Structure formats: structure tokens, C-alpha cells
Image (tube, helix red, strand yellow):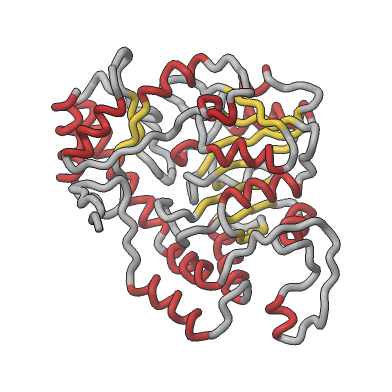
Amino acid sequence: MTLPRQWRVPFSDVRLDEGDRAAVMAVLESNWLTMGPRIQEFEEAFATALGGGVSAVAVSNATAALHLSLAALGVGPGDEVICPALTFVATANAARYVGATPVLADICSEDEWNIDPADVERRITPRTKAIIVVHYGGYPVRMDEILNIARRHGLVVVEDASHGPLSEWRGRKLGTIGDAGCFSFFGNKNMTTGEGGMVVTARADVAERLRLMRSHGMTSNSYARFRGHAFGYDVVAIGYNFRMDEMRAALGISQLRKLTSVNLRRSLLVERYRHAMREALPTVGVPFGDWEGPYAFHIFPVLLPGGYGDRADLMQRLADAGIQTSVHYTPIHWFADFTFLKAELPITDGLADRILTLPLYPSMAEQDIALVVDTLRDFL
């Protein structure tokens, strides 16, 4: 059996503490593992952390969160959903799950890798029903412009805030600004439940539909029946099995308590990275390089110089030196199953093959950053 590579600096490094383990063990010892009281506790704590005024609905993952958000907002066959091309494939797939067509929009610039509101407006047609914005890296989209466009055209707005738990835009937490906000708790996120996600919304009607649809459209769940609060159920809407379990909710509660300090640590590491990059690699671009708000700083992507050759070869050489890197992201329309989405996306297409995402995680030391930057400088 081949052992996994031992990285000197891995791309991410998830470290669970005794509090995390104790939270999960308490669930195992309770003998109630499926959706129950810890789900409700997690939902309430998450809504509170976002400033209140919203309902939070825990789901199995962020892809399910996006899917359910569009379905609960009435997006369906024949509709169009505008989203950025520079995102994870789940963002565009969510539109396809409800029978709608994703319409790809460009990013703002080589310095701002969020969806361009002006390009969003150019792509609106009579079939457009929704806009999905992605807060890339936890840096906020220009939500004032997006909301104005949505109001003028009668569109709903879904925020993909998977990178941005506790990030803010003008004093408001990301995910609480549009009609629904979606979060990911995947293993490499700022807070993790292994797999898991959350939808938040200030609209009571949407929250009610989300709760129904995540569990087969049933009017009561197993825990309510176990406690004697219900003796049966009706099925009143089409639904799915997108539930979260109690172990993940317990881990989420524990992780949420540490999220503010985790985000602060990430912000300090990004500050060190930015300084090191300016000193050692001034020809390498750093998007959002002077953004200093209360952000989640989920990833640290850089832009290789124009005309740079083989990125895959560079990533392999970095790997051989013990440094793991990634790419955020391959544009949606570059994938074989999305070639039907033909669009002029000059900024995205012009930079996508130069994106390189460097390691970033709370337990990184300053010498790790120095090693990454110095090694990248040597290879460039």
C-alpha cells in the first residue's frame, strides 16, 4: 500500500480539538443520531452569529443548500439563473437541478474576482428569474448594485457564501443580504462538519418551504414523533433527503464557537502573505490585495504573470518540494458538460489558466508562508 504524500506545507490542515471530539461523542452516547435537538441548537446559534433576523436551515451540504434555495424561491424549468463563470461547479449545477439554465457572467477585473454587476444586467432576458452571487474567497460582491438590478427586474438573489462565514458587507453578514444565503461546512472550510451546509433567509415563507423540502415534504420528523409531539405525517410538497445528522450539528456548534478567532488568524496570515508577495514576487498578482474588512479570508489565490507557461508543471514542482497547491477555479464553461454555455467572458478567460491557490490554514506558521513564497519565487 502506498502511503499518502507527507506535505511540508499542505493546502489545508483540519485540526479538531477536544471540544470538537467531546461534542460528537456526546451525540453518540445519546443514542439519537438523526435530525434532532442539536440541529435546532446549531441553526439557532448560526442565525444568531449572523446577527439575527434570519432563519437558518441545516442541510447535508452546500450543494443541497443552493438547490433547495432555488426550488424554495420558485425557480424552475424554462427559467434562467445568472451566476459567475469563475466558481465551483455546484453553483451552476444548482440551476440545472431545478430545470433552469445557468447563464454565466464575467468577473469585475483582474483585481476583483467577483461577479460583475454590469455584466449581470447585460445578460438579463425575459426568462431570467434569479441571480446567484458567489462571494469569492469571502470577499463581498457589490451587493448594492446587485440588489438594485434585482429590484428593477423582479429577480431573486441567492448568495453563495460558502467562502464567507462571518464576512461582512457594509455591516451586514454575507448570506443575510439576498433572498437566501448558502454556506458550506466541507472539510477545508473555515468551520467544518466534514460534510454539511446551511441556508439562511429572512423570508418566513422561504424558510418554511426549505424545512419541508429538505425532508421529503413531510409535516413532521422522526424526532417529533419520538417525543410524542406527532403520531403521523402528511407529505405536502415535493421534497428531498437533504437532512443533516446530529453528529455534524454537534461538531458545527463547537466549530462555530471558534469561528471568529479562526477568521482573525486567517486575516493575519493573509497580511503576511501579501507583504511577502510584494517583496519577493511583485509581478505576481494578488486579487483583493488591499481589502481589509471583516472577511473570512478563506483562500489565498494569486495570478501568475501574463504569458507564464505551464501551470501544471509549476504545481508539480511545488508538490515535489512538499508544497500543495490548488486552483480556484476552472471556469464552468471550460468543462466538457458545460460547453453548451457559450458566452463572451474576456476577463475570466484571460486569467483562468494563470490562477494558483496557495496554502492557507489557521495552524500555518510564518515560516511556512516564507517557504511557500520563496519556493514559488525560485521556480518562477
Q: Using the image as rendered, state which of residue 341 and residue 152 is in the foreground.
A: 341
Q: Using the image as rendered, state which of residue 265 and residue 40 is in the foreground.
A: 40
**Where on the picture, by quarter, is residue 94?**
top right
- Residue at 67% in and 47% down: 67
Q: In this view of the protein, can residue 147 be seen by the observer?
A: no
Q: Is residue 23 left or right of residue 178?
A: left
- Residue at 25% in and 53% down: 4
- Residue at 64% in and 53% down: 200
Residue 84 x/y as whole percent: 57, 29
Q: Using the image as rendered, state which of residue 266 and residue 227 is in the foreground.
A: 227
Residue 22 x/y as whole percent: 40, 78
Residue 122, compared with residue 201, is above or below; it is: above
Count every numbered label the image shows and give the total. 0
Residue 169, compared with residue 353, is above or below; it is: below
Residue 287, compared with residue 43, is above or below; it is: above
**Where on the picture, by quarter, is residue 299?**
top left
Image quarter (top left, top right, bottom left or bottom right) of the N terminus: bottom left
Residue 267, compared with residue 286, is above or below; it is: below
Q: Using the image as rendered, state which of residue 295 and residue 7 is in the foreground.
A: 7
**Where on the picture, by quarter, is residue 142?**
top right
Q: Is residue 11 left or right of residue 187?
A: left
Image quarter (top left, top right, bottom left or bottom right) of the C terminus: top left
Q: In this view of the protein, can residue 329 be seen by the observer?
A: yes
- Residue at 81% in and 83% down: 231
The residue most toward the front is: 1
Residue 170 x/y as whole percent: 54, 39
Residue 225 x/y as whole percent: 74, 81
